[in-house]
Amino acid sequence: MAEYKSFQEGITVNGEAILGLVTALESGQDTRLQILKKHGINPEPGKWYSQQASLDAFKEIASNIGNHTIFMIGKTMFEKAKGPSVDNIKEALGLIDQAYKMNNKGGDVGEYILKDFDEINKTAVMVCRNPYPSEFDRGIITSIVRKFKPKGSLKTDVTLDTTKETRLKGADSC
């Protein structure tokens, strides 16, 4: 699977998460809401919507507005979407999957796996197996890394490993 394609039919996303797509950034909210409505989504808290329709809207936002907007939306999702409370970087990265599955349901929604965490070298490897854009995932992970960065860290850098399979190249994960 590549970006923007649900792993199966019937997957749904909660309204709060979709509203996060709209309210993530001050500018462009009306445009993003119109794009969602064009794809049959008028997001309301407590309701569930087609994941594929939301992915179609994501794709249109990326195409028409840009991947930087997708990245910025991902950065705000950590604060907007439902999820467990955490207090350290390893726990936060490890719980992305739980938060994701609280906001997407109905079958194989994909997953986020903390594959490697090296506290001494201050590195981590996440495997993001889901249909969302890679830049969205990078935004989510960047937000978490910045919030919980280890003491003494001067910078945070979240990058896509293009030496491995990626959704950008049609794979199921990045």
Image (cartoon, grey):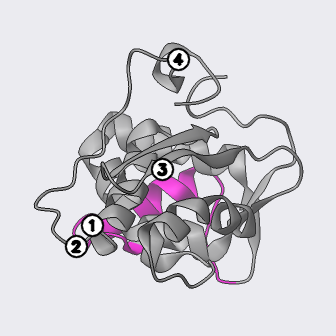
Residue highlighted by disc 1: 146
> Mark 2 or mark 4, which is nearer the start of the sequence?
2
Residue highlighted by disc 2: 151
Mark 1 Cα shell of 10 Å, populated few (<14), some (14-19), many (≥20): some
> Mark 3 or mark 4, which is nearer the start of the sequence?
3
Residue highlighted by disc 3: 117
- For numbered disc 4, what is the local secondary structure? loop
Q: CA distance from mark 1 to mark 4?
A: 26 Å
> Mark 4 or mark 1, which is nearer the start of the sequence?
1
- The x, y position of residue 80, in whole percent, is 48, 78
Q: In the image, what residue type sits under mark 3?
A: Phe
Q: In the image, what residue type sits under mark 4?
A: Glu
Q: Which mark is residue 7?
A: none
If the image is split into quadrants, where does the N terminus sit?
Answer: top right
> Mark 2 or mark 3, which is nearer the start of the sequence?
3
Mark 3 Cα shell of 10 Å, populated few (<14), some (14-19), many (≥20): some
Furthest-front residue in this view: 120
Stretch of the chain drawn in magenta: 23-45
Q: Quadrant of residue 130?
A: top right
Residue highlighted by disc 4: 165
The answer to whether residue 19 is left or right of residue 24 is: right
Mark 2 Cα shell of 10 Å, populated few (<14), some (14-19), many (≥20): few
Confirm or deny contact between disc 1 and disc 4 (CB under 8 A): no
